[in-house]
Amino acid sequence: MKSRLKEIMKEQGRSQKWLSEKVGVSMTTISSLKKEKSLPSLPLALRIAKTLGKTIEDIWHEE
């Protein structure tokens, strides 16, 4: 899976700290997701997408 999380956060001027606080995970988790080192659970993906005003498909997609 490819992630646009880093790009979307940069476009919106959002920090890892801000997103981690909004969705209730550590900044390390957000960092791993941004670097494509891990994939989120479905509930976390939904929280992130909703928080950023995007769909899951806007953020993660198959290569």
Image (spheres, helix red, strand yellow):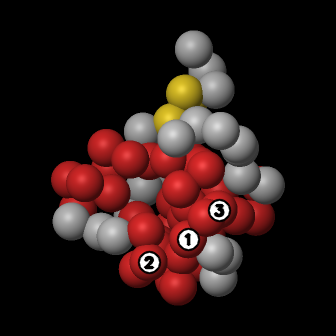
Mark 2, secondary structure of its residue: helix
Horizontally, residue 14 falls left or right of residue 56, namely left
Q: Dot 2: within a 10 Å radius of its alpha carbon, few (fewer than 14), some, or many (20 or more) residues?
A: some
Residues at badges 3 and 1 in contact (C-beta under 8 Å)?
A: yes
Residue at numbered disc 1: 27
The correct choice, above or below, for 20 with respect to 30 in the image is below
Looking at the image, is 36 positioned above or below residue 16? above
Q: CA distance from mark 3 to mark 2?
A: 11 Å
Quadrant of res 52: bottom left
- Three-letter amino acid code at disc 1? Met
Measure how far apart labels 1 and 2 are at the Cα level: 6 Å
Residue 19 visible here: yes
Residue 54, percent across and down? 42, 55
Residue at mark 3: 29
Q: Which mark is residue 17?
A: 2
Identity, as a three-letter code, of the amino acid under mark 2: Lys
Residue 60 appears in view: no
Question: Which residue occupies the foreground of this view, 28 or 4?
Answer: 28
Work out whether mark 3 precedes mark 2 in sequence or the reverse, and give the earlier one: 2
Residue at x-position 79% and y-position 55%: 41
Q: Quadrant of residue 39?
A: top right
Of mark 1 and mark 2, the one earlier in the sequence is: 2
Do the CB atoms of the residues marked 1 and 2 lie less than 8 Å apart?
yes
Asked which secondary structure carries label 3, the reply is: helix
Look at 51% across and 83% down and name the residue there.
22
Question: What quarter of the picture does the N terminus occupy?
Answer: top right
Residue 3 in the image: above or below residue 51: above
